[in-house]
Image (cartoon, rainbow, N blue to C red):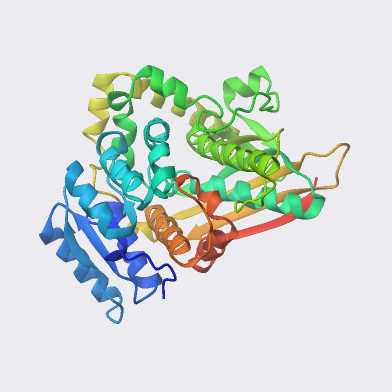
Amino acid sequence: MPSRQHGRQYDLVVFGATGYTGKLTAEHISTHLPTDMSWAVAGRSRDKLEQVVAKCKLLNPDRRQPDIEVCSLDENELATLAKKTFILITTVGPYGIHGEHAFKACAENGTHYLDVTGEVPYVARMIRKYEGAAKASGAIMLPQIGIESAPADLITLSLASALRSKFSAPTRDVTVSMHNISGTPSGGTLASALTLLDNFTLSELRDAYRPYSLSPVPNPGAPSPPRSLLSRMSGLVTYPTLGLQTTSIANRTDGALVERTWGILQQQEQQQQQQGAGGSLPAPYGPNFSFREHMKPRNWLSGVAIHLGILLLGLTLAIRPLRALVARFVYQPGEGPSDEDGTKDEVEFRGIADPDVEGPVAERAYCRAVFRGRSMYYLTGVLAAQAASTILEDDIELEGGIYTPACLGQGFIDRLNDAGFRFETKMVPV
């Protein structure tokens, strides 16, 4: 039974439950979260919401079924919905177009908030506009809780925790590899990418993707291992344990979130030193921390092709007629691969990290996180639902503000392990 006594009508509402990712999120809630939890599915169409409820009942007839809340993107309607629930999960994107009213409603009404965006400029804008309101109301806001970019953030937390345990030392370098991502992007993901330049100015994009742009404190050092000219041109680089790597399309998206985690933890440490009080967040990563993400190619030729393909994609997104042309041939928002196709998906991340110590060490931290047998967008639903369950049932002791997945701590990772997203962290030889 959820432990939080909040006096609201619902423990949890899924807004956008008739969309592709929203349906998968509701499915996971129905089959994995507490059976007596009070919850609702929300969206514009009652008929479509009734279909979602029918599917939930078919999956688990013995649990409390979700209520239906008809709600549009209207600011007043979303404020009313936010006041009814303890936690709101919103899967309605692109967030640069549709996300702000839900974010604002939660920040101003003390409603804990989760979204699955990968739009870093949107997150930067929300931090700038609403972090003060969230702190004042007590709302715990967790953007980017889906496959973009929670896995990299949680792997980094696992690696840093392992180094603290082994060496009693902070972390220096973290490298995460998208070892295997098999699956087709949904219409929502593609729409977010194709409309990015329509929703944000070039200045916003440039500022949002700067290193440590989302961090509440600067990291003036932010060292990064040097790369040769050939490596920069080809995208190829080789790391111990991880092997051959190439450019990752998610490097700056995931990096922005990990670097915000770094800043939140550094800020907490500074506050502890000033106030002499203990903190509720994980231990800080350390002042010399750096992060990078790559992708595992089949071979050097495919690695170069991926690198050049990402450059070409960037050019395509920058030219409006090309964006419009691409949009005609891909999934539309609310659409995605079939359930049958999703069973073939596999998601695997790997990461390594070195301690920030003087002199050589014999070991480094290694983490492997794997999810199989369901769509990668089902994993997004797992991440959002289990984060909500962590807020509902665990004593996380977070004050109001805009946080990252890693701020939910090891308890969140433990829940993900139980739900099928397996994390294995250990020490390996250097």
Q: Residue furthest bottom?
A: 62
Q: Which of the 4 image quarters holds residue 17?
A: bottom left
Residue 316 higher or lower than 116, as above or below: above
Does any portion of residue 366 appear in the rendered image?
A: yes
**Residue 113 placed where, x, y %?**
37, 50
**Residue 45 placed where, x, y %?**
12, 55
**Residue 59 placed where, x, y %?**
29, 74
- Residue at horizontal 24%, vertical 68%? 66
Closer to us: 322 or 176: 176
Residue 90 higher or lower than 200, as above or below: below
Residue 6 higher or lower than 222, as above or below: below
Q: Which quadrant is the C terminus positioned in?
A: top right
**Residue 31 placed where, x, y %?**
36, 72
Q: Which quadrant is the N terminus positioned in?
A: bottom left
Q: Residue furthest right?
A: 359
- Residue at horizontal 34%, vertical 24%? 317
